[in-house]
Amino acid sequence: MPIWVDADACPKVIREVLCRAAERTAMQTTFVANQLLSVPSSPHIRALQVPKGFDVADNEIVRRVNCGDLVITGDIPLAAEVLAKGAAALNWRGEPFSTETIAAQLTMRDFMETLRASGIQSGGPATLSQADRQAFARQLDSWLARKKCNKHIYIGKQHQTA
């Protein structure tokens, strides 16, 4: 159950949180980008560079992700695709994407894109705040804790690690 990061637009501070968490928990974390990324030397952290092109990194994540994995992204269409495969998705602000709300998020995204294409200025997202960073770290820790609990199987009085 690794973590996949849509790293082309991932804020540096979020990459740092992810790297610390990967080291602390020994969770395999892969940063996928179409540019060369510098990541700490660790058996739990890797950078995967894909060719340049529209949605190449997203498509690679979708190809590799499995049910139960976590994808970190700000890209709503990518989140929709990984949710459909049974993976979890979390944005940089610590807001989890869900199957219950993803259709509405896609509709709003498409609407805003249409407005921008017609020349209406809608502004960009707000700057990532300290509260956003903390919310992200809390949600990540919560996901990691759930995955850690799922690794343990209790059989009667015996305890085994899966």
Image (cartoon, helix red, strand yellow):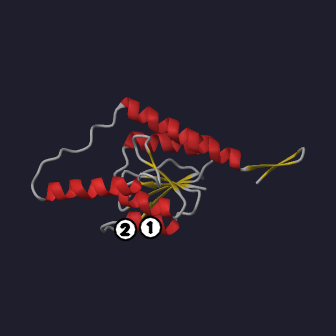
Q: Is residue 40 above or below residue 68?
A: above
Residue 117 located left or right of residue 44: left
Give me the residue at 45% from left, 32% from top.
Answer: 134
Determine the secondary structure under disc 2.
Answer: helix
Residue 66: in sight, yes or no? yes
Q: Position of residue 76 (x, y in %)?
A: 36, 55
Q: Amino acid at mark 1?
A: Glu
Quadrant housing the C terminus: bottom right
Q: Quadrant of residue 36?
A: bottom left
Query: Of helix, strand and loop, which one carries label 1?
Result: helix
Front in this rendered view, residue 27 or 155? 155
Say which residue appears at 58% left-offset and 51% top-offset: 44
Q: Quadrant of the N terminus?
A: bottom right
Left or right placement of residue 32 versus residue 141 in this view: left
Q: Is residue 113 left or right of residue 90?
A: left
User: Residue 45 location, x and y as percent?
Assistant: 54, 52
User: Which x, y percent locates residue 140?
Assistant: 52, 42
Between the C-alphas of marks 2 and 1, the distance is: 6 Å
Residue underneath mark 2: 56
Asked whether 101 or 57 is in front, the reply is 101
- Residue pointed to by mark 1: 60
At horizontal 40% and vertical 63% (from top left) the residue drawn is 58
> Are dots 2 and 1 in contact, CB under 8 Å?
yes
Say which residue appears at 33% left-offset and 57% top-offset.
106
Tell me the quarter of the picture where residue 56 sits: bottom left
**Observer able to see residue 75:** no
Label 1 neighbourhood size at 10 Å, few (<14), some (14-19), many (20+)? some
Direction top: furthest residue: 130
- Mark 2, residues whose alpha carbon is within 10 Å: few (<14), some, or many (≥20)? some
Residue 97, given in percent of the width and then of the height, sits at: 44, 50
Which residue is at the far right? 157
The amino acid beneath tag 2 is Val
